[in-house]
């Protein structure tokens, strides 16, 4: 059976779908969280106590995990020189404020 009529509920369902960038950010955050969870579980198995995964890793190792999972692209600071209207509006993270 073929229907050529789209119901309003179908349109509404499509509008509620997250944008591509949002899906990418959520996927990257999920990969990062799962990676840190696996490291914590492995450390707990070895040391028999609860250890935070970020305490075990060096800054370079965390940066590597950020880059591999895609989180590094999500947290990259904006360029204060090339961002339009940077003098008129403040950034949400306050990176370019008070220059």
Image: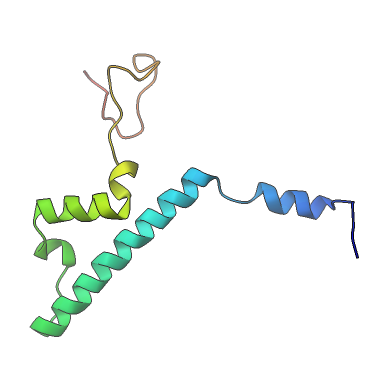
Give percent across and percent down for residue 19: 55, 45
- The residue under the point 89% across, 60% down is 2
- The residue under the point 27% across, 24% down is 96
* Residue 50 appearing in the image: no
Count up the numbered dots. 0
Colour basis: rainbow
Vertical placement of 15 versus 50: above or below?
above
* Residue 55 appearing in the image: yes
Vertical placement of 92 versus 56: above or below?
above
Q: Quadrant of the N terminus?
A: bottom right
**Quarter of the figure with residue 46:** bottom left
Left or right of 68, for residue 22: right
Q: Quadrant of the C terminus?
A: top left
Left or right of 9, for residue 67: left
- The residue under the point 28% across, 30% down is 94
- The residue under the point 36% across, 56% down is 29
**Quarter of the figure with residue 50:** bottom left
Vertical placement of 66 versus 81: above or below?
below
Give percent across and percent down for residue 92: 36, 33
Left or right of 51, for residue 32: right
Left or right of 55, for residue 93: right
Which sits in the foreground, 48 or 70?
Answer: 70
Give percent across and percent down for residue 77: 28, 33
């Amino acid at each position: 059976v073929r229907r050529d009529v789209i119901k309003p509920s179908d349109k509404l369902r499509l509008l509620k779908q997250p944008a591509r960038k949002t899906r990418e950010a959520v996927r990257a955050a999920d990969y990062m969280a799962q990676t840190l969870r696996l490291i914590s579980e492995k450390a707990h198995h070895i040391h028999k106590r609860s250890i935070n995964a970020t305490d075990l890793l060096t800054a370079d190792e965390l940066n590597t995990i950020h880059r591999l999972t895609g989180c590094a692209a999500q947290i990259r600071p904006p360029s204060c020189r090339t961002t339009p209207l940077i003098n008129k509006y403040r950034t949400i993270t306050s990176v370019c404020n008070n220059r």
